[in-house]
Amino acid sequence: MLSDALPEIITETLPGPKSAALIARREQAIPDAIHCGAEADENAVKVAKAFTKRPNIIVFSGAFHGRTLLTMSMTAKKAYAKGMGPFPDGVYRAEFPYIYRRPAGMPKKAALSYYIGKLKEVFENCSPAGYVAAIVVEPLQGEGGFIPAPIEWIKDALACAAALKTIEIMERDHLAERPVSMGRKVMARYEEWKQKYGVIGDVRGFGGMVGIEFVKDTSTKEPAPELTKAIIEENARHGLLVEGAGIYGNVIRFLAPLVMTNVQLEAGLRIFEQSIRKCIGYEETGHAKVGV
């Protein structure tokens, strides 16, 4: 059973002798069933606070953790939280490593140290490290704009295998290979569009989770939320449903079902490109309109 196998996996995964003590208390800390991501996040926070006896947690800009009371306070986007307060305290926010929007002129290599420094600032300005029970992070942000954190930045993150059956099925059906192949194709096509149309500032992601960020000017990186909205609506008119994301409303996310066929993928990409061309007036002029 999952409830019997999970503690063994966690014990093998967590470093140090404290892991055994944590697992020994699982019956009081972890319920038999977790029904959604928000509940999983809340339980992770509860376990961390119960074990460390510390009151605070740190989350990040652009984060999405759910729509329960605690996870709304952890989520960066406050449109979900209007009229829902007051919220739990002890939740502090650090700056997520949004590499594309690092300070102007900063080399990528320097950005890693910069964002680590921004995390340390939280310990100085918000909560001493000794009062922090957990740092909750999405290695690849979704709602925030499909932003992957640098591997070096998250090297200490721990993962918990909470669904053995899911892992078994993924391995059996080789489902991990499908998003890689789809992602490569999508990234390659997006990169072509980036060079061709002049309104795409960044293309990023891992595997089959890819974000494409639209800007008014690739030099200034000024977001283009109006264009993004227009492209989403034009896609919908032609039968392609895509979703926006990002703190500026200028990112379109690609997160397709693992069972999507190559024919379906190609059809979607074709509609997507046609929508971009129409919304920037490319078909009429051969170039994107200035100031789109």
Image (spheres, rainbow, N blue to C red):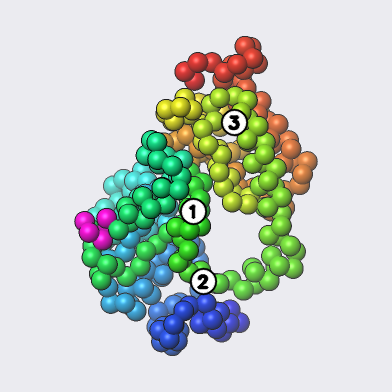
The chief SS type of the magenta part is: helix
Q: Which residue is drawn at 53% across and 37% down?
A: 202
Amino acid identity at mark 1: Pro
Residue denoted by label 3: 194
For the residues labelled 1 and 2, say whether their Cβ atoms are less than 8 Å apart. no
Which residue of the protein is positioned furthest toward the left in this rendering?
125
Q: Mark 3 and mark 2: span between their CA atoms? A: 37 Å
Residue 164: where, in percent of width, then height?
62, 74
* Circle 2 SS class: loop
* Circle 3 SS class: helix
Residue denoted by label 1: 150
Q: Would you call the spot at circle 3 few (<14 residues within 10 Å), some (14-19), or many (20 or more)?
A: some
Which residue of the protein is positioned furthest toward the right in this rendering?
263
Q: Mark 1 and mark 3: span between their CA atoms? A: 22 Å
Residue denoted by label 2: 160
* Circle 1 SS class: loop
User: Is 190 located above or below residue 148 in the figure?
Assistant: above
Between circles 3 and 2, the one closer to the viewer is: 3
Amino acid identity at mark 2: Cys
State yes or no: residue 140 in magenta: no
Q: Would you call the spot at circle 2 few (<14 residues within 10 Å), some (14-19), or many (20 or more)?
A: few
Amino acid identity at mark 3: Lys
Between circles 1 and 2, the one closer to the viewer is: 1
Start-end of magenta stretch = 121-125
**Residue 200 shows in this picture:** yes
Q: Residue at x 46, y 40 (%)?
A: 100
